[in-house]
Amino acid sequence: MARVYVGIPTINRPRLVRETVASVLAQTYSDICVTVSDNRSSPEAIESVRRFVESLDDERVSFHVQPTDIGEYGQGRYFMQQAEDCDYLMILHDDDLIDETYLDKSVAVLDRNPDVAFFIANPYLFDETGVTSEEDTRRYLENRRRSEISDGKIDAVEGFFEYGITKVSGTLFRVSALRQSNFVDAEATGNYPFECDLFLRLGDIDAKAWFASEQMLGFRFHSSSMRNYMNLMDNRHVVTGLTRLVSERQYSGHIEHRRRVTLARLQRAYALICLREGDYRHSRARIVQALRENVLSLKAWLVAPLIFLVPGLLRRALPELPESAAAPTYVENAK
């Protein structure tokens, strides 16, 4: 069995996934096993990727079609099972790339530091045609304050709450650490919040990460990317899932403060979702909870009058307007 298992989840991106696979096979580190796992693409896309993998004639690469749409959680569990006998696991999205020395460098770091659970590097951002955007890359790294992190070890939970180190794609994980953390919540399904679930569980076991400031992997921004057409903080499934994960944990010191700030933001987003859905009772309860978590949140104070005053004005104008007695259900597999 290879030391490094690379799982590439794909759905209806037969052209882009070819580039992703090529970037893995171009690695200077060769002790790898690669599985391209299709999550119920169109028959044409499935056949196209199958022919591509077969044409590689490389015994390290295989193609698998999932019997049903199992979402990111299902794909992640599948890769974890397949990597059981490997030392390291990487999940690389079907529109991202890794530089040719990435695995060499990341494996060397993890081999030298057995107490480190995963290796994560800075990304560069590029478009559908492969052109790197220095401006988008600079903005991405600035927004996450990556220049404030020194190369080397960092607490996983600090990386999560302080610097947004929550991107699964391109991160190299130690399989034994994922096993120790139980990977992700057993009952969770769909796409979100898979990444946050995984990193928070690593934080639960006080895992360490190795951060490298070098830009060694590429995140592709394009029209069919969910980050471009879906506002995650407007999605009930995403927000409720994240709220549950963050609220059931507690830390100390500055990280606890950051957790509560994060939770306040989530409660505020949840309040606005309920308001749009006409669920005024839950909307009020959520904005109150947001202020309890972070009484200094200016955005929560700005939203509160909207939540408390507008529904009352609407009911006076439209007396037949009902108030929801329960929160509406969410979409299970947000895409």
Image: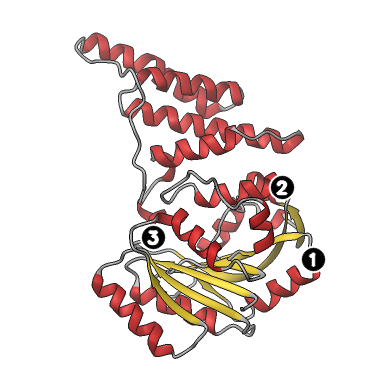
Tell me if mark 2 has few (under 14), some (14-19) or many (20+) residues whose alpha carbon lies within 10 angstroms of its own. Answer: some
Q: Is residue 170 visible?
A: yes
> What amino acid is found at the position of numbered circle 3 in the picture?
Ser
Query: For numbered disc 3, what is the local secondary structure?
Result: loop
Q: Earlier in the sequence, mark 1 or mark 2?
A: 1
Q: Which picture quadrant has residue 174? A: bottom right
Q: Which picture quadrant has residue 36? A: bottom left
Check disc 3 and report the residue beneath it.
225
Query: For numbered disc 2, what is the local secondary structure?
Result: loop
Q: Which mark is residue 183?
A: none
Q: Where is residue 169 in the image (x, y as percent from the top left)?
A: 53, 63
Relative to residue 116, is residue 64 drawn left or right? left
Q: Position of residue 242 (x, y in %)?
A: 51, 40
Q: Which mark is residue 113?
A: 1
Mark 1 against mark 3, which lies toward the viewer?
1
Query: For numbered disc 1, what is the local secondary structure?
Result: loop
Relative to residue 88, is residue 96 drawn left or right? left
* Callouts 1 and 2 close, C-beta under 8 Å: no
| The N terminus: image quadrant | bottom right
**Label 3 to label 2: alpha-carbon separation:** 32 Å
Coloring applied to the structure = secondary structure
- The one of 86 and 52 positioned closer to us in this rendering: 86
Check disc 2 and report the residue beneath it.
205
Mark 1 against mark 2, which lies toward the viewer?
2
- The one of 170 and 35 positioned closer to us in this rendering: 35
Q: Position of residue 306 (x, y in %)?
A: 39, 21
Relative to residue 208, is residue 200 drawn left or right? left
Relative to residue 251, is residue 97 drawn left or right? left
> What amino acid is found at the position of numbered circle 1 in the picture?
Asn
Q: Which picture quadrant has residue 128? A: bottom left
